[in-house]
Image (spheres, helix red, strand yellow):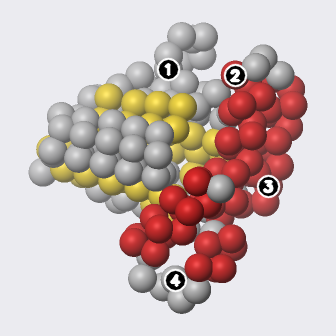
Amino acid sequence: MKFIKEQIELIKLKDPALKSIWEVFLYPSFIVQIYYKLAHFLYDHKHYFLARFISEKGKRKTGIEIHPGAKIGHNLFIDHGECVVIGETVVIGDNVTLHHGVTLGGVTDSKEKRHPTLEDNVLVGAHAQILGNIVIGQNAKIGAGAVVLKSVYPNTTVVGIPAKQK
């Protein structure tokens, strides 16, 4: 119940198009995170097949793929969401916003940490690709369409291919 209340407040804050709190239940970001929470619980308890089965159901329903092994903090907001991919070893802090088409992916098939870490209050623009075991610092902003292959310092904005500090 706490998650639902938090999501209602978060979506009211982030999306001016929200006209009724009941609309929250239609938001792909909200729906996929319910699937993720269940899948992540099962993954943590080593029920890997069932965890992946549930995460695949969430992906098919919303177009957002969150691996059940990812670690996600409070108040993740995925705006529009279609084609968002969050890999297995991703770590996402609190109050992070991802726009549609974002990939938080790996660049190796290693079994070690191979996906990015996004610290608190990070904003990622549409279609940005953040790849590899890198850290995106607190309050950083990633421009739309950026390809980020190196860690980003806190409180900075990066844009372009490859991403560079603005």
Residue at mark 3: 60
What amino acid is at disc 1?
A: Arg
On the question of residue 128 being in view, the answer is: no
Label 3 secondary element: helix
The residue shown at (41%, 55%) is 97
Question: What residue sits right under mark 1 in the picture?
Answer: 114
Pick the residue in front: 141 or 1.
1
Using the numbered discs, state the Cα–Cα distance from disc 3 to disc 4 in whole angstroms.
Answer: 24 Å
- The amino acid marked with disc number 4 is Leu
Instruction: Measure the alpha-carbon separation of dots 1 and 4.
Output: 36 Å
Label whose residue precedes the other's in the sequence (2 or 4): 4
Q: Is residue 121 left or right of residue 46?
A: left
Q: CA distance from mark 2 to mark 1?
A: 18 Å
| CA separation in Å, label 2 and label 3 | 22 Å
> Which callout, 2 or 3, points to the residue nearer the camera?
2
Nearest to viewer (mark 3 / mark 4): 4
Under circle 2, the secondary element is helix
The reply to whether callout 2 and callout 3 are in contact (CB within 8 Å) is no
Q: Which residue is mark 4?
A: 18
Amino acid type at circle 3 is: Arg
* Earlier residue among tags 3 and 4: 4
Marks 2 and 1: which is nearer the front? 2
- Of the residues under marks 1 and 4, which one precedes in the sequence? 4
Corner quadrant of residue 1: bottom right
Q: Can you give x and y, in whole percent of width and height, for residue 86 in the image?
A: 57, 40
Task: Identify which residue is drawn at 23% across, 47% down.
Answer: 139
Instruction: Give the residue displayed 59% in from the left and 53% down from the top.
Output: 3
Residue in the image at 62% along x and 72% along y: 24
Which residue is labeled 2 in the image?
44
Between disc 1 and disc 4, the foreground one is: 4
